[in-house]
Image (tube, helix red, strand yellow):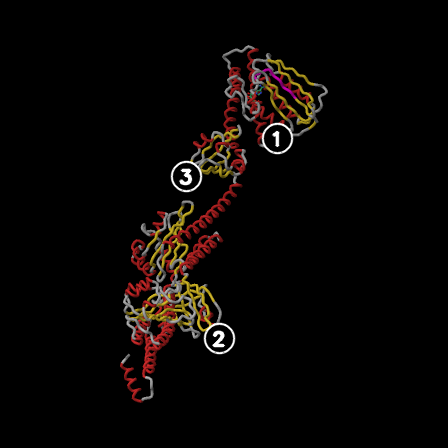
């Protein structure tokens, strides 16, 4: 007992107010114990402190030799929590022992005065004895009706437990029980709130608790970092002005947001609220996107008193989404218009600032030069500067990233643009300008379509934008891919349109044009080509030209070929082409370009025929004229000679040569006249009803004088031959020519038969001979102008080759037909058929 108690007892005794000293002593001890336990409870910060204090107190107040406190664990097993004077071995042997069942309803203290009387099981009794304990008391700690633990008092010797000891123990036990439970609860609460705070501190989500006035009650580190503070402490201790100066809050569309629309404020009005926000840190311009969800916390009366906002940083996914959105928009834009220059300029604008701080789009021209079509800068006032700089200093330097990208076809990524100023700049002023534009990192992606580089997109970051990373390069590559595709489409479309216009023009030109790809397949075949080769475009296009033009291989070698590189054109060459068995003369030239070869030609067959005719005419006529002239000249000279005396018969012979050759001359001239009149269209035909038989007889009579003796001329004409519709002069000419030929081409003599008969609605004249014959292959051609089977006079029969031509032309003009039948070996039969009158 403490000395204060003794003092107190002494003073109390002196006043003599209290009779029973023992009773008083006990009361005082009890009060002292209660005071101490209350004090211990108040002082102790933890349960262990409390229990330690309780052991000291138990020993001093009860006078026991040793003491211990055990608390029931979650399973109801008694575990030592504090002790004095008991060994480890003892505790180990006795832990878990309890005189009460864990769920005992009103457990009472168990007092053992002598170990031997306790009735313990032998093991327990042995353990107690071994510890040197003579007497012991079990005092339950009960809270409510729950057994929360026990305290034990031990005496080394047997001890008689007095009622006041029992009472004191129970009182202490009551207090200790409730203090233990309370401390335990407090401890649990502290632990869980510590845990909660730890959780709140460590979660990635920012957590902010706001009071109705808008003041911050709590914020975790994540929340602080989101808005640009280093830690929650800095954030919470910052003044309202400091906080507001730190960041700006924008909505999903980056529009400033009214403070009362913030989810935390909305929650303070009693509504759960969520939305996407952008915190723009003013100092750096950095933008952080958050998804904020705020819930109200209500007080007992149902009024919202706090709002708890959970802020999730969605900057990364948002950036990804914005990029995707940008790509989608760029894709739409590119797909919408064929005016790709305008579109690329718009894309440059669009890419700032989502993707970059500065964008320049250049196109590579056919001549290798570079033309800027789009320029944009985060600072709109600098856009024109960027463009002008590009115009003034096109990126032509070999090591300029634009050139590298064009050369390699790969994206170029510069982590530090400023370290490359020397490679890019052309003079100090240029270098200065590049520095001023202050790009930090850069990407140049080539625009490539179908293996051809069309240009580049150059992107640069400008602080405070973060430098580009691998994802940005990927995005740039994707953007370039889409832009290239659109660019290529637009160019193809434009080229196709130009080609369509060109093809349209080709439809109307008289010159034949066809285009072969590199494999020799026809890709274009204009109507003039179709007419010249007699193959329709629909049939020609897509087929190898060698299937359409005979002997293409040989022909191709003769066609002069220019290339687009060498430029200019070569003089066309006139070559014969076999068109379905007919020879056509084409003046043709070709130009090779990267995709194939285009051939252009003019069909000169007609012109060539005229040329040919002219030379044939000169050759034939001069020859044909020379023969009779020579004969006449010779005869005339002989007749004139005075040194030779000519017999009468000789004179007559020479005179008849002059006469017959003059006649031949006259016929030649006559033929030429007829032919020229036919060609010039001056021939008038006057068709009337004539007596064909009579006409034929007149012709034969006229010719009879020329008929050599070897030729037998006979006429088989029906007297009742119906009249024929013809021009009598022309018919006479036709028959004269045919009978004359029959005689002429029968050098070995033979019969010449002339007849005429009715054939349906026509009158058919037949002139048959037994002469040289006409080979079937030439039976059409003999009717052509100047055509002669024997132009070199091997068979000795002369002629102009005009006679049958005149016949055919005249017969056609009289609406008739003319043809020959012959096996080519012996004899020919010519037919002339004219309408009956
Ligand atoms: P030419 O002045 O040569 O007789 P033509 O136009 O009358 O000219 O005849 C053309 C060619 O046709 C002749 O050169 C000849 O080779 C052939 N020819 C014409 N008539 C006969 C015939 N009756 N028998 C055989 N060949 C003929």
Disc 1 or disc 3, which is closer to the eye? 3
For the residue pair 526 and 727, the one nearer the viewer reads as: 526
Disc 2 or disc 1, which is closer to the eye? 2
Q: Residues within 10 Å of mark 3 (few under 14, many from 20)?
A: some
Where does the image place residue 94, in percent across and percent down from the top left?
Answer: 33, 64
Q: Does the magenta stretch include residue 560?
A: no
Q: Residue at left 43%, top 34%?
A: 560
Q: Earlier in the sequence, mark 2 or mark 1?
A: 2
Magenta segment: 765-772
Where does the image place residue 304, in percent across and percent down from the top left?
Answer: 47, 73
Q: Provide the residue designation for mark 2.
A: 301
For the residue pair 49 and 379, the one nearer the viewer reads as: 49
Furthest-front residue in view? 117
Quadrant of the frame with the N terminus: bottom left
Where does the image place residue 348, in percent across and percent down from the top left?
Answer: 42, 57
In the image, taking residue 824 as reference, residue 48 lies left or right, namely left
Q: Which of marks 3 and 2 is nearer the N terminus?
A: 2
Q: Provide the residue designation for mark 3.
A: 563
């Amino acid at each position: 007992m403490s000395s204060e108690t003794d003092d107190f007892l002494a003073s109390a005794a002196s006043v003599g107010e209290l009779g029973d000293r023992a009773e008083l002593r006990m009361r005082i001890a009890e009060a002292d114990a209660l005071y101490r336990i209350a004090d211990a409870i108040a002082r102790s910060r933890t349960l262990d402190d409390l229990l330690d204090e309780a052991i000291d107190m138990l020993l001093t107040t009860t006078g026991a030799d040793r003491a211990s406190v055990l608390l029931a664990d979650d399973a109801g097993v008694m575990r030592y929590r504090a002790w004095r004077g008991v060994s480890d071995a003892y505790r180990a042997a006795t832990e878990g022992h309890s005189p009460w069942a864990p769920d005992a309803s009103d457990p009472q203290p168990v007092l053992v005065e002598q170990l031997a009387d306790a009735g313990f099981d032998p093991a327990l009794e042995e353990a107690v004895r071994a510890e040197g304990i003579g007497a012991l008391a079990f005092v339950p700690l009960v809270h409510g009706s729950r057994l929360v633990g026990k305290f034990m008092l031990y005496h080394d010797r047997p001890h008689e437990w007095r009622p006041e000891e029992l009472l004191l123990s129970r009182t202490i036990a009551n207090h200790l029980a409730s203090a233990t439970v309370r401390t335990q609860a407090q401890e649990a609460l502290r632990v869980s709130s510590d845990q909660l705070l730890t959780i709140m501190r460590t979660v990635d989500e920012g957590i902010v608790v706001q009071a109705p006035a808008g003041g911050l009650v709590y914020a975790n580190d994540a929340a602080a970092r989101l808005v640009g503070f280093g830690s929650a402490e800095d954030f919470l201790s910052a003044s309202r002005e400091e906080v507001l100066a730190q960041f700006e809050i924008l909505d999903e569309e980056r529009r400033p947001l009214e403070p009362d629309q913030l989810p935390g404020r909305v929650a303070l009005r009693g509504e759960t609220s969520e939305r996407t926000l952008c915190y723009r840190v003013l100092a750096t311009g950095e933008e952080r996107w958050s998804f904020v969800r705020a819930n109200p916390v209500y007080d007992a009366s149902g009024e919202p008193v706090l709002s708890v906002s959970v802020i999730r940083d969605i900057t990364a996914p948002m950036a990804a989404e914005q990029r995707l959105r940008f790509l989608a928009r760029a894709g739409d834009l590119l797909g919408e218009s064929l005016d790709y220059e305008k579109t690329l300029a718009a894309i440059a604008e669009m890419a700032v600032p989502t993707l970059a701080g500065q964008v320049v789009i250049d196109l590579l021209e056919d001549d290798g030069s570079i033309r800027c079509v789009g320029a944009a800068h985060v600072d709109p006032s600098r856009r024109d500067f960027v463009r002008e700089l590009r115009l003034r200093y096109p990126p032509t330097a070999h090591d300029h990233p634009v050139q590298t990208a064009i050369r390699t076809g790969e994206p170029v990524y510069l982590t530090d643009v400023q370290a490359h100023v020397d490679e890019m700049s052309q003079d100090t002023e240029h270098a200065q300008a590049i520095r001023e534009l202050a790009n930090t990192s850069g990407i140049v992606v080539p625009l490539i379509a179908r293996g051809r580089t069309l240009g580049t997109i150059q992107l640069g970051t400008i602080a405070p934008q973060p430098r580009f990373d691998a994802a940005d390069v990927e995005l740039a590559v994707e953007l370039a891919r889409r832009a290239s595709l659109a660019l290529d489409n637009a160019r193809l479309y434009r080229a196709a349109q130009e080609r369509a216009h060109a093809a349209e023009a080709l439809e109307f030109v008289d010159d034949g044009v066809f285009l072969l790809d590199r494999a020799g397949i026809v890709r274009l075949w204009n109507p003039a080509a179709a007419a010249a080769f007699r193959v329709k475009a629909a049939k020609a296009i897509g087929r190898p030209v060698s299937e359409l033009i005979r002997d293409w291989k040989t022909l191709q070698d003769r066609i002069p070929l220019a290339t687009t590189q060498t430029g200019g054109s070569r003089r066309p060459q006139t070559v014969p082409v076999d068109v379905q068995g007919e020879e056509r003369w084409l003046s043709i030239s070709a130009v090779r370009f990267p995709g194939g070869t285009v051939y252009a030609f003019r069909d000169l067959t007609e012109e060539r025929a005229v040329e040919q005719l002219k030379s044939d005419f000169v050759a034939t006529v001069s020859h044909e004229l020379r023969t009779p002239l020579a004969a006449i000249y010779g005869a005339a000279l002989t007749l004139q000679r005075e040194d030779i005396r000519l017999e009468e018969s000789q004179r007559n012979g020479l005179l008849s040569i002059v006469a017959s050759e003059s006649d031949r001359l006259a016929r030649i001239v006559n033929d030429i006249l007829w032919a020229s009149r036919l060609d010039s269209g001056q021939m008038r035909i006057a068709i009337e009803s004539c007596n064909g038989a009579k006409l034929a007889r007149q012709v034969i009579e006229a010719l009879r004088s020329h008929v050599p003796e070897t030729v037998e001329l006979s006429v088989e004409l029906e007297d009742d031959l119906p009249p024929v519709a013809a021009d009598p002069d022309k018919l006479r000419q036709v028959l004269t020519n045919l009978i004359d030929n029959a005689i002429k081409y029968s050098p070995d003599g033979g019969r010449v038969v002339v007849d005429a008969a009715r054939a349906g609605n026509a009158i058919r004249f037949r002139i048959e001979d037994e002469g040289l014959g006409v080979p079937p292959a030439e039976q059409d051609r003999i009717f052509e102008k100047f055509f002669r089977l024997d132009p070199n006079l091997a068979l000795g029969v002369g002629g102009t080759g005009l006679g049958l031509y005149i016949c055919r032309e005249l017969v056609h003009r009289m609406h008739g037909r003319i043809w020959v039948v012959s096996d080519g070996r012996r004899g020919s039969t010519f037919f002339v058929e004219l309408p009956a009158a």
